[in-house]
Image (cartoon, rainbow, N blue to C red):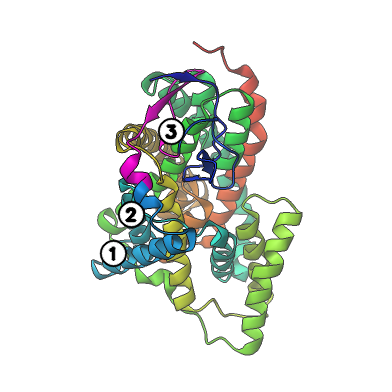
């Protein structure tokens, strides 16, 4: 083990560049001299480079060019989704693809996620969720004021519980624990944590695993405990799609993504299409949704991208970080149950719907789950957007109150 300086890895899912250094997908080069199979991870201000056996992993990775590895990842993701579907497991196409490619990634298989397709994929899902907005949503505006107030209190409680958990149980410094424990804003927490000298890979692992663990726990809760059907209903088709409907849905996806980026919305290529699709459906211009086959394909691609994020992660490291993430997520969901009960008492919201609105999973993924159990997608999406905005705006403000590193 050797001590190295801070390493600005942007995301899980390293690829080896021609220069032989690790490069995060969408990020900057790793610390000079680190190979793709070396991950900077540890507690405190410095990082301990934990070497992962390189020879076999890199040899397998180099067997195929990037496009072939992407094709292999999608094929494996499709197979995983099909297996989950045949086993009648929850959210089969997304979770099956995620599980299969995650295992393959950690094992060093030559797979790669089609990350460049993600904006298009989340735009499709945004249009799908927007199709569930009805005029009745506007009538529930007063109810949202009560639940949003509860959301604010809930986020404060999560911060006060989860950040100390990462500090004392995870044995991280306060800065790393703070940005790892925030319930949302992966990209923003990485940027802010790096600027404050935090352990960036620890933050990346914490947030990526938070999403995966939340999806798994929520799917188990709704399918096994509450006996909801969270399988094929996600891909259920709406009314038949005419030419005008297809044009409106495509325009919602394309123009919505552009609008979201221009307005700098959180999750712009998802939220922009959702807003335009919702407007088209609320105004009665269309009642159609994207075709079932397209939605299934989008879920497979999304699950494959999520699973391939774990390329280059040592199994031992992933196990330790996974246990830590499981603990923090269980604590967060316990607080979500309390806040959900408050929403039910104060605004008459179903507990299942409140849990989906409060769960620390991804906006896209929780929206899909809300769609699967026939919950109010608009309600769930609104609370996740507000959650992300609150975290992004207030996290840097309260980070100034952090104690010094120990």
SS for callout 1: helix
Residue 136 to residue 193: above or below: below
Which of label 3 and label 1 is nearer to you?
Answer: 3
Are there few (<14), some (14-19), or many (20+) residues within 10 Å of tag 3? Answer: many
Q: Which residue is mark 3?
A: 39
SS for callout 2: helix
Q: Which residue is mark 2?
A: 99
Picture quarter containing residue 85?
bottom left
Residue drawn at 32 percent across, 36 percent down: 53
Q: Which residue is mark 1?
A: 84
Q: Is residue 121 visible?
A: yes
Place of residue 212 in the rendered image (x, y in percent of width and height, measured from the top left): 40, 47
Q: Between marks 3 and 1, how big is the CA–CA gap?
A: 31 Å
Q: Which mark is residue 333?
A: none
Place of residue 405 in the rendered image (x, y in percent of width and height, measured from the top left): 53, 13
Tell me which numbered mark, 3 or 1, is placed earlier along the sequence.
3
Task: Give the residue at the far left of this rendering.
Answer: 87
- Horizontal relation, residue 101 to residue 263: left or right: left
Place of residue 354 in the rendered image (x, y in percent of width and height, measured from the top left): 46, 50
Q: Is residue 105 visible?
A: no
Residue 347 to residue 116: above or below: above
Q: Nearer the viewer, residue 286 or 298?
A: 298
Q: Which residues are magenta?
A: 36-58
Residue drawn at 49 percent across, 75 percent down: 294
- Horizontal relation, residue 311 to residue 389: left or right: left
Q: Between marks 1 and 2, how big is the CA–CA gap?
A: 10 Å
Q: Between marks 2 and 3, how big is the CA–CA gap?
A: 22 Å
């Amino acid at each position: 083990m050797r001590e190295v300086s801070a390493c600005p890895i942007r995301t899980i899912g390293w690829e080896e560049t021609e220069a032989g250094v690790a490069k995060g997908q969408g990020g900057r080069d790793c610390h000079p001299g680190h190979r793709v199979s070396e991950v900077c991870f540890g507690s405190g201000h410095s990082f301990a480079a934990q070497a992962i056996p390189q020879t076999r992993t890199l040899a397998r990775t180099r067997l195929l060019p990037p496009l072939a590895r992407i094709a292999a990842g999608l094929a494996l993701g499709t197979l995983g989704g099909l297996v989950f579907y045949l086993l009648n497991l929850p959210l089969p196409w997304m979770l099956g693809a995620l599980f299969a490619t995650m295992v393959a990634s950690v094992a060093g298989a030559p797979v790669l996620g089609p990350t460049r397709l993600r904006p298009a994929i989340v735009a499709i899902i945004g249009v799908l969720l927007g199709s569930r907005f009805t005029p009745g949503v506007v009538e529930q505006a007063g109810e949202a004021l009560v639940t949003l107030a509860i959301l604010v209190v809930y986020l404060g409680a999560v911060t006060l519980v989860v950040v100390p958990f990462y500090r004392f149980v995870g044995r991280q410094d306060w800065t790393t624990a703070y940005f790892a424990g925030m319930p949302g804003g992966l990209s923003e927490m990485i940027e802010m944590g790096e600027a404050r000298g935090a352990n960036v890979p620890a933050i990346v692992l914490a947030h990526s695993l938070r999403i995966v663990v939340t999806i798994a726990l929520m799917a188990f809760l709704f399918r096994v405990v509450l006996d909801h059907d969270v399988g094929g209903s996600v891909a259920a088709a709406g009314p038949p799609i005419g030419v005008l409907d297809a044009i409106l849905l495509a325009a919602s996806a394309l123009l919505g993504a552009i609008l979201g980026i221009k307005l700098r919305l959180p999750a712009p290529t998802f939220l922009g299409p959702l807003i335009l699709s919702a407007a088209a459906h609320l105004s009665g211009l269309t009642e159609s949704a994207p075709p079932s086959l397209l939605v299934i394909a989008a879920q497979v691609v999304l699950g494959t991208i999520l699973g391939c994020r774990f390329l280059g992660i040592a199994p031992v490291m992933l196990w330790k970080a996974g246990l830590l993430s499981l603990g923090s997520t269980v604590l967060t969901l316990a607080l979500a149950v309390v806040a959900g009960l408050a929403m039910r008492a104060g605004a008459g919201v179903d507990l299942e719907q409140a849990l989906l609105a409060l769960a620390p999973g991804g906006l896209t993924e929780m929206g899909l789950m809300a769609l699967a159990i026939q919950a109010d997608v608009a309600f769930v999406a609104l609370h996740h957007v507000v959650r992300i905005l609150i975290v992004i705006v207030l996290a840097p403000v309260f980070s100034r109150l952090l104690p010094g590193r120990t």
